[in-house]
Image: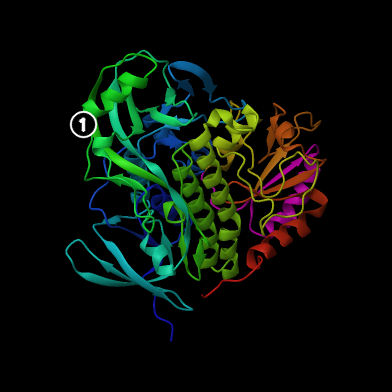
Amino acid sequence: MARDHTTDVLIAGAGPVGLSAAAELRRRGVSCRVVERLPARLPYAKAVGIQPRTLEIWDRMGLVRTVLEAAVPMRGQLIHVNGSEVARIDLALPPEVPYGFAALPQYETERILEEYVAGLDVRVERGTELLSFTQDADGVTAHLRTGSGATEEVRARFLIGCDGAHSTVRKGLGLSYEGGAFAEEYMLADVVADWDLPYGYGVRASHTGDDGSTDDLLVCIPLPGDGRYRMSMLVPPGLSAGAADGAEVAHGLEGARVPELSDIQAVVDRLAPRPATLSGMRWASVFRISHRIVDRYGEGRVFVAGDAAHIHPPTGAQGMNTGIQDACNLAWKLALVVHGEAGPALLTSYDAERRPVGEEVVGRTVRHATRGIENDADDMETLMLREAQLLVGYRDGPLAGAPYGPDDAPQPGDRAPDCAGLTAQVAAYPLRLLDVLRGRTGHVLVLYAAEAADLTEAAGPAAEHGLEIVRVLACDAGVPEVTACYRDSAGEFSRLYRPDGPTGFLVRPDGQLGARFPLSGIVQAVSDHFAALSAPAGGLSRG
């Protein structure tokens, strides 16, 4: 006999990834519990980079304004080697991208997300640790230990491990975590520098020896606050603990060894491009870096996301942002399964779509950490778009429909681009596509045509699937304005989406394109996409 579930989804870990999963699940009416072993948020500026793609996701959630008010811009990086500036990288993106790069301490990101999920009736259960779990055909049984020392048994439909590099969930599933560790140890500190470097620019200053290897390093990332930076650098011999045990995952902060402000100042004196006196140190620590990835992102009803699935160097601020996208990809699929709107086999697409992304990120960040981002083989525009995570796509995944239209146009699996200049009958100002999509939680069908009749004819079959519909008229459409329709007044939708005549675009809940098709083929295209949601390649493994 099946046992009753006390919650739909149990989430282990209340970092940015776990909180993002909770937010996306609750927005879609899925019950969840979030347990966190730590009694309080850590006051450390660990993951600080916020990528433009993450800001787009938070825009869809209605959260982005709060983040923008707390963050600072990341405008570029100054690269110095042996005392000379060798490169200045400006973090420039095409004008149609709505957000730039930003920096925000992880504890602030967690605060904002925790307040957001609290508004959705999710309370983080701090001081509560996941001890073990088992799963069966109907759900997951988890054993917890609360802050008082009491134990509790929880029954959930699904379990998500967002519990970091030393994940209990990953270990409980028996997932491999292959990779290696960097021999170097680093110091990390949150300090104020009184130099006159340009606002919003980070610094990477290094010294190379006669053999070309880097033997001294300083990386500074701006934080909110006048002159405040998160600085990282190699550990001096006096603070080194020596080589790590290769059997352990050597990744993250080590609280036992705490550098002094003088240790940080000594490195700045040697390497900084401008003289600077440091002050106001909030905290400092020693940390190690590993690069690892699991062999699969889940098994049965249990999944891993974020650092529990992949760890790598912090180069380019990819880790937390990749984890947040893991959570968003998984959450909308879990919601469909929980509500009975898709078969459980849909969940295999989480691994199929996200593990290739994790593998690419791990490989790229290791290359950038060892060779420098300025030595990347990609042209600068492609490099910036990739660092911004705007090129993440699933064209080869099991949910991508057949391509249609120009090869270089956005195709199924790609990010659905934002665009400006949409006008409506009542609004006296132009809208962005993100404005139109904000707050929507399901699939959205965007219909484009030069004739209002084509939009009206296509909307009928689309409504049969219960889809939300956005209708867009071409900028030069020779018809009067139509109710419940946007006009592509600036021609930007046409320029970015490159429709081939009357064209439909099915936007997934995570902002990726699920299908692209001629409006005459709308019934078949939408039916095919939702059939794929019920039966992607493979099945829901029970292990």
> Which residue is found at the position 28% from the left and 62% from the top?
129
**Above/below status of 281 relative to 365:** above
Q: Residue furthest bottom?
A: 1
**Which residue is located at x 58 percent, y 26 percent?**
429
Vertical position of residue 408 compared to residue 84: above or below: below
Residue identified by numbered label 1: 260
Amino acid at circle 1 = Glu
User: Does 447 appear in magenta?
Assistant: yes
Q: Is residue 335 magenta?
A: no
Q: Is residue 240 left or right of residue 16?
A: left
The front one of 48 and 465 is 48
The residue positioned farthest toward the left in the image shown: 148
Residue 334 % position (x, y): 51, 62
Q: Residue at x 58, y 66 (%)?
A: 341
Q: Position of residue 62 (x, y in %)?
A: 46, 41
* Mark 1 crowd level (few <14, some 14–19, many ≥20, 10 Å Cα): few
For the record, the magenta segment spans: 439-468
- The N terminus appears in which quarter of the rendering? bottom left
